[in-house]
Amino acid sequence: MMKLLYVPALSIILICSVSSYSQLRNPSIRTIDFANFTYPYTVGLLLPPDKQRNFRLRGGSLPETKSAVGMSLGHVFYEDVTRDGSEEAIVYLDVYTNGSARPGCIYIYRMSNGRPQLLWAFDTGSRHYGGLRRVYADRGELVVELYGRAKVIGRALFANDGTLAQTPYPYAVTRTRYRWRVNRFSRVGKPEEFADPHPEKYGIPLFALKS
């Protein structure tokens, strides 16, 4: 009788131990302090004479210098954009330039073997030149909304989309969907263009207004 009770109890202990070990080995992405973190420069941020490939935020910011733009942590939120049942971190950084432009950068990380793994990093434009409106998960897909027409990551975001001469400016938005496949995000379907239903919030990423 004692043996019959002992075996299930031992099984429970082993299961709990394996579960606890798994959690310790691969903790949640929420444990990462992205305000004090080293990021790789995106293509749009690398200056020709700059040989550095990474930059580090301290206290959520990086001061601007003569040879590098300033950066600050805009927002971090968590969504499952790979359909693996675990959250990924979507990090938005504000970029400060010497002019009036206010581009941004998006970094997407997941936990792998107890460490953050970068899945994708890309630049966004500024205002109607491909500025970020929203980035979020929908049905396991990554959705990126940029201001302007035909504004898609990987294209010339600062190109004239043919609407600048119109007054008042039509706050057009381009929405593009991406799906994680094997080891990269691939575009799904054709980008969708629509008029901004909330033009009064133009120029500010909508997730920033919710915080």
Image (tube, rainbow, N blue to C red):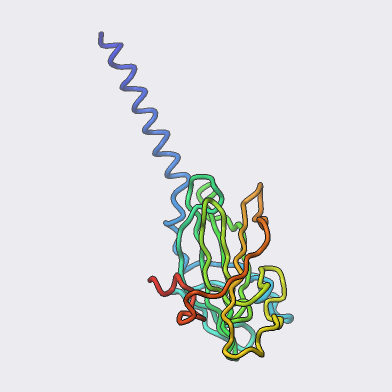
Q: Residue furthest left?
A: 1
* Most foreground residue, 86 or 125: 125
Using residue 72 as the reference point, say whether residue 7 is left or right of it. Answer: left
Q: Residue furthest top?
A: 1
Please identify the quadrant where the N terminus is shown.
top left
From the viewer's perspective, is residue 86 above or below residue 4?
A: below
Using residue 59 as the reference point, say whether residue 195 is left or right of it. Answer: right
* Most foreground residue, 142 or 111: 142
Residue 40 position within the rendered picture, expressed as x and y whole percent measured from the top left: 62, 67
Residue at image x 47%, y 52%? Answer: 87
From the viewer's perspective, is residue 83 above or below residue 116?
A: above
* Most foreground residue, 156 or 200: 200
Residue at image x 60%, y 91%? Answer: 167
From the viewer's perspective, is residue 3 above or below residue 34?
A: above
Residue at image x 66%, y 68%? Answer: 153
* Res 9 → quadrant: top left
Residue 176 position within the rendered picture, expressed as x and y whole percent measured from the top left: 62, 63
Count the marks. Answer: 0
Q: Residue furthest right?
A: 48
Residue 18 position within the rendered picture, expressed as x and y whole percent measured from the top left: 42, 33
Residue 148 position within the rendered picture, expressed as x and y whole percent measured from the top left: 62, 77
* Res 126 → quadrant: bottom right
* Res 211 → quadrant: bottom left
